[in-house]
Amino acid sequence: MKWKQLIPRRLRRLGRSAWKDLPNRLADLPEDLADLFRADPLPPPRLRFRVSGTSSRSQYLNIGRQAAKDLANAFLAQKEPDRQYRTWLDFGSGAGRIARWISKEIRPEALYCVDTDAGAIAWARRRLPIAEFRESGAAPPLAFSQATMDVIYTVSVLTHMDESQNLEWLTEFRRLLRPGGLLLVSSHGPELTFTRPDLTVEQHETLGRRGFLFAPGDSGFNEDTAFHTWDYMTAAWRSLFEPLAYVPFGLTRFQDLSVWRRSDPTGAGRVAPAPPTSA
């Protein structure tokens, strides 16, 4: 028996990734040590690595900063001029990679961050006082009252969930948003299927026919991938939200970014007019 067969594939992949990341760990070690005494530290390498497969401080900061700018620009382009958007929710916040910048870009009166990653939430509670961090379950509901949020944004979360999970969480977002509140969502367009070279011909055909594909991975949530077309989203989500804007590659020049409004009760099911293709 070959030695590789004795080690699960997932552990082999993690080992290769950790070895590849070792130069980042060594280069960032002085700054990571200094973070022990800073008022605004970054999460430790293991939490940064968990987000994107690299512990690089510069990548963690740059992607978080750019994502926050893209979200802020999309929000500002669609907000109602006379409306106050005081309460924000970061769904799938991790240890606050985007929240630390949203708190500077937008400065909401209240920013709540939720994630299933208990370690990331525990660290952020201790070291990042820019928001209220709460651990969440893997399924709705969240521990917030109905119609308490003005803006919800979610980045790289629905992109890893199957169709039923997508719709369950979208229904929960509608419950949490006040009428007229905004939802900002990142998604994988069909152009990103190159990130899953293991997709079969049948899976590509399903995406082309339905506009949606969920492709399970072999290493848990982060390896599962969902692809959405804009036509699919506007058809499947219109009973919950009014589509406002869609920006292909609008989030860090990679994922698509869309903006939705929680319709008032009398208009929840109407067919919305075709939205612009840019925010």
Image: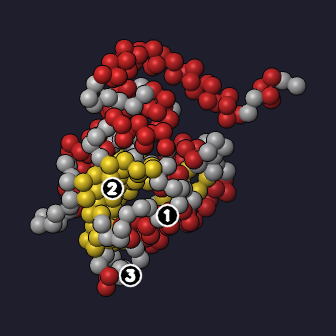
Could one spot residue 191 in this view of the protein? no
Could one spot residue 38 in this view of the protein? yes
Instruction: Name which residue lies at 28% across and 73% down.
Output: 179
Which element carries disc 1, helix, strand or loop? Answer: loop
Amino acid at the residue labelled 1: Pro
Residue closest to the far front = 126
Disc nearer the start of the sequence (3/1):
1
What whole-number distance in Å separates the C-alpha atoms at marks 2 and 3?
Answer: 24 Å
Q: Is residue 86 left or right of residue 29?
A: left
Instruction: Name which residue lies at 36% across and 37% down.
Output: 126
Q: Quadrant of the N terminus?
A: top right
Q: Is residue 140 left or right of residue 87?
A: right
Give residue 140's position: percent from left, percent from top. 49, 63
Q: Quadrant of residue 27?
A: top left
Task: Note whether 234 is above or below 21 in the view shown.
Answer: below
The crowding category of the residue bearing disc 3, from other C-alpha atoms within 10 Å (few below 14, some 14 to 19, many at least 20), is some
Q: In the rendered image, which residue does mark 2 sit on?
A: 89
Q: Mark number for residue 140? A: 1
Amino acid at the residue labelled 2: Leu
Q: Mark number for residue 269? A: 3
Closer to the eye: label 3 or 1: 1
The crowding category of the residue bearing disc 1, from other C-alpha atoms within 10 Å (few below 14, some 14 to 19, many at least 20), is some
Residue closest to the far bottom = 266
Q: Nearer the viewer, residue 186 or 143?
A: 143
Amino acid at the residue labelled 3: Gly
Instruction: Name which residue lies at 28% across and 25% down.
Output: 38
